[in-house]
Image (spheres, helix red, strand yellow):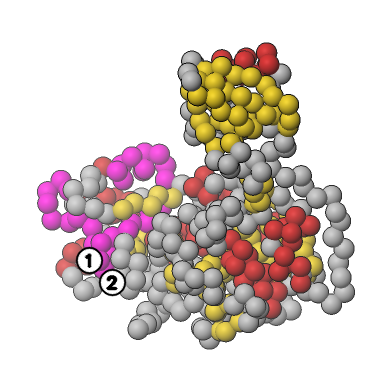
Amino acid sequence: MYSKEIQKKLKDLELEIGDSARVKRGDQVYEGILMPKQELGDPDAIVIKLSNGYSLGLKFRGSELEKLEGHKRIGFKSSEEKVKRIAGKPLISIISTGGTVASRVDYATGGVDASYRTSDIVKTVPELGEFNIDSKFLFEIMSENMTPEHWKEMAKAVYKELKTDTSGIVVTHGTDTMHFSTAALSFMLKDLNKPVVFTGSQRSSDRGSSDSFINMICSANFASKGDVAEVSLVMHGSSNDDFCYAHRGTKVRKLHTSKRDAFKSVNDEPLAKIFPDGRIEMTNGNYRKRCDGEVSLDDKLEEKVALIKAYPGMDPGIFDFYIGKKFKGFVIEGTGLGHVPTAVEGRSVIPKIREATKAGIPVCITSQCLFGRVHDFVYANLRKEFEAGAVFCGDMLPEVAYVKLMHVLAHSKDLEEIKKLMLTNVAGELNERTPVFE
């Protein structure tokens, strides 16, 4: 929002966003369309879009502002067109939680809007016209702001759609924590009978290099035609627009900040290779198949679980903080095979692991390495962790162990039962033997 001083001036001039305006600053005169201030932009600067397509920010103080004739609507007007189902076309459900797939740019003004109407989505991604689509808006949130409550809402929305005649569900989601959400729904949705596909975009739809369109097309095809009745994540498989990979929801992680093929399967093969023309090549023979069974929802979570990273010089007192806050479980991202500091006096984590487990608080060990698995008997220091009561979680990813412990603690308070459940494979999160891939 613009500063109060600018807002007052705009009100006095009856100048609104989208109006044509002239800004004079010294000897320079600029004419263009008054634009809204960007979320992180300077509130004391006026933003206008010039006729050459560029936007310009000018300090308000010392500038003269004048209203000109003309107005352009920022963004685009959502279509009121009703999309009818056409016999013979497969039906998919699209649930939006904040991805950029449905965004659209008005290049006359530079405004970006997101629409969740089926007709607008099809206009944005015309290839989706081969499907009948039920489009649902759940919430609009940056994925770093997701909470376990959002996971529950997603699980409930997906469960509702699974009870319909849809062929599969696509969930659009921000990329940064999408693998947390796929893990959560993998545990919450029991006995899946149809594909549940998460997708997003590394680059917004107003960029020529956007990956949103291919990701959405491949996701829709996998949800409609795929035989995998699991929660999966579908994103670019390479830096080109040639294919996407479907990754198991409990074995995937974002491994690059900005590349289009940022998501990789970890300790597992991708489930499938999907092409924009609809072809699907299965690359992993171990998956749950479509069926006529009855899906169930179990969205109970114990939120007082901490994910703690082991590092040189860490203060073991961090455990005291969480225990004082009545936390019910810990997942430690150990180094290598699951190591934590053990030798330096006053820095050893072993007493804290022992204290927690004696109090009935489970401590689970995973690895920062991601690839490979933790092991409790290779080194003497690892045995100390085991003897203190820690649970070594095989090749489970730290984030997945974090979400799984939330789910397990919501169903049992018995430490031995919790250990048993954490080491029981539920949704492909835990391999008895970690496969080796070339």
Which residue occupies the foreground of this view, 81 or 420? 81
Horizontal relation, residue 319 to residue 208: left or right: left
Residue type at the position of mark 2: His
Residue bearing the label numbered 2: 375
Residue type at the position of mark 1: Leu
Assess disc 2: are there few (<14), some (14-19) or many (≥20) residues with their C-alpha within 10 Å of its C-alpha. Answer: many
Give x and y (percent) for residue 14. 71, 18
Contact, mark 2 vs mark 1 (Cβ under 8 Å):
yes
Looking at the rendering, the stretch of residues picked out in magenta corresponds to: 318-347
* Position above or below: 69 against 201: above
Give x and y (percent) for residue 72. 72, 36
Which residue occupies the foreground of this view, 24 or 161? 24
* Mark 2–mark 1 distance (CA, rounded to whole Å): 7 Å
Residue at (49% x, 47% y) in the render: 144
Residue 257 is a magenta residue = no
Give x and y (percent) for residue 310. 27, 54
Assess disc 1: are there few (<14), some (14-19) or many (≥20) residues with their C-alpha within 10 Å of its C-alpha. Answer: many
Residue bearing the label numbered 1: 382
Residue 214: mark in rendering: none
* Position above or below: 330 against 125: above
Which residue occupies the foreground of this view, 388 or 280? 280
Residue at (49% x, 55% y) in the render: 177
Residue at (40% x, 68% y) in the render: 396
Residue at (49% x, 34% y) in the render: 40
Secondary structure category for the residue under label 1: helix
Question: Which residue in the rendered view is the most extreme toward the bottom?
Answer: 285
Secondary structure category for the residue under label 2: loop
